[in-house]
Amino acid sequence: MLIANHIINNYQENDKEDIYNLSKVFLLILHYELNHSDLLEYLVPRTIKDLKKKGKLYQTEMLVLNVLQKTHSVTTYNKARNFVKLREKLLDLKSTKFEATANTLFDFEDWCNQKIMQFKD
């Protein structure tokens, strides 16, 4: 969490924008894992708006943000379904060269698999 915060708080215009964007998404994933649903309710829409404004947004990031945005208001069963759908979409994007960069920095597919297994328990 400290590294993601450091990247976000010390971002310079000449820094790699994809690292900054992924750090923002990763920070939201951390908040999700810590069950900070009230915070996510506020941060996810704000992050989507911020990243869209910057213009360089991976589809992977958008898909993850959309799932995070829905999670606070759905049942456990629907959360599991959302993660299954997310994993399927991520697998489709995996072959895209542009999207592959996002997956080298964080294994979104593995994270989805862990969430799916967690909801099955």
Image: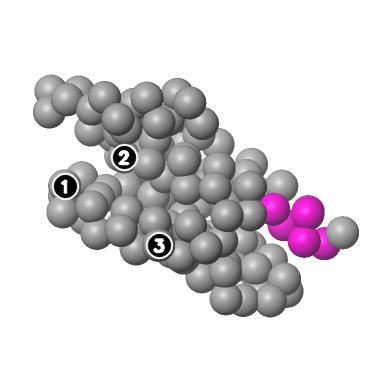
Residue shown at 87% from the left, 59% from the top: 121
Tag 2: residue type? Answer: Asn
Q: Secondary structure at mark 1?
A: helix
Secondary structure under tag 2 reads: helix
Q: Is residue 16 left or right of residue 65?
A: left
Residues at discs 1 and 2 in contact (Cβ within 8 Å): yes
Which stretch did the figure color magenta? 115-120
Rounded to the nearest angstrom, the CA distance separating label 2 from label 3 is 17 Å
Query: Which label's residue is closer to the chain start, 3 or 1?
Result: 3
Q: Where is mark 3, residue-wise?
A: 42
Which circle marks residue 54 in the picture? 1
Q: Quadrant of residue 72?
A: bottom right
Q: Give 38 or 96, whichever is nearer the viewer.
A: 38
Indicate which disc residue 21 carries. Answer: 2
Prevailing secondary structure of the magenta residues: helix
For image coordinates 71% across by 47% down, the residue present is 114
Quadrant assignment, res 78:
bottom right
Can residue 21 be found in the magenta stretch? Answer: no
Q: Earlier in the sequence, mark 2 or mark 3?
A: 2
